[in-house]
Amino acid sequence: SARDRLERTLRATGEPWHGGPRSEPARALLAEYAPAVRRSLDDFDRLAAEVRDRAATPVLTHGEPHPGNLLRQGDRRLLLDWDTAGLAVPERDLWLVARDDTDLGLYEELAGRRPDPAALALYRLRWSLEDLDDFLVRFRSPHTAEPDTEEAWQGFTDTVKDLGTQGP
């Protein structure tokens, strides 16, 4: 699982990484932020238990309802790319589409259900941890200095630093 791989990667920060030009810088940055990443994993476990204990009714969720998966067709909006669909609490999607408390209030008014702050935090944190794992797989694997690598590097550094300042 991504979780297991992330924990193995954290344990491997004491050894050199040889995948490519961003391997060692990625290792060094992860080593620096390892306590924050471990704290984030602990926070994830705590939030998951809290959300699970509430036993909210699951609904069909998309999993990645970002603008890249939204097609405008006249006045219609179509949500594309359903490969990550699943049954979960609504917050699985809400954390990504609700810009602020006004949006969450509108959801509550329309759905008759107040969004759970712990579930919103859980799915926000899950996204960050999964992104972190994806970036680390890339930088520990063979890679070269290309524009995509530099874009991934920026995403990686932003994600690691955000985890260092994030609280549930």
Image (tube, helix red, strand yellow):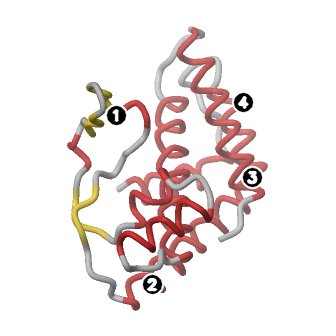
Residue extending furthest toward the front: 75
Residue mark closest to the camera, 1 vs 3: 1
Closer to the chain start, of discs 1 and 3, is 3
Callout 3 secondary element: helix
Closer to the chain start, of discs 4 and 1, is 4
Residue 35 x %, y %:
73, 62
Q: How far apart are marks 3 and 2 (CA)?
A: 25 Å
Q: Which quadrant of the figure has residue 92?
A: bottom left
Q: Distance between the residues labelled 4 and 2?
A: 34 Å
Residue 37 badge: none
Residue 70 lies left or right of residue 30; in this view the side is: left
Callout 4 secondary element: helix
* On-image quarter of the C terminus: bottom right
Q: Which amino acid does label 1 sit on?
A: Leu
Label 4 crowd (10 A; few <14 / some 14-19 / many >=20): some
Q: How far apart are marks 4 and 3 (CA)?
A: 12 Å
Q: Name the residue under label 2.
A: 49
Q: Distance between the residues labelled 1 and 2?
A: 32 Å
Q: Mark 1 points at which residue?
A: 70
Q: Which amino acid does label 4 sit on?
A: Pro
Q: Mark 3 points at which residue?
A: 33
Residue 140 lies left or right of residue 24; in this view the side is: left
Q: Which quadrant of the figure has residue 38?
A: bottom right
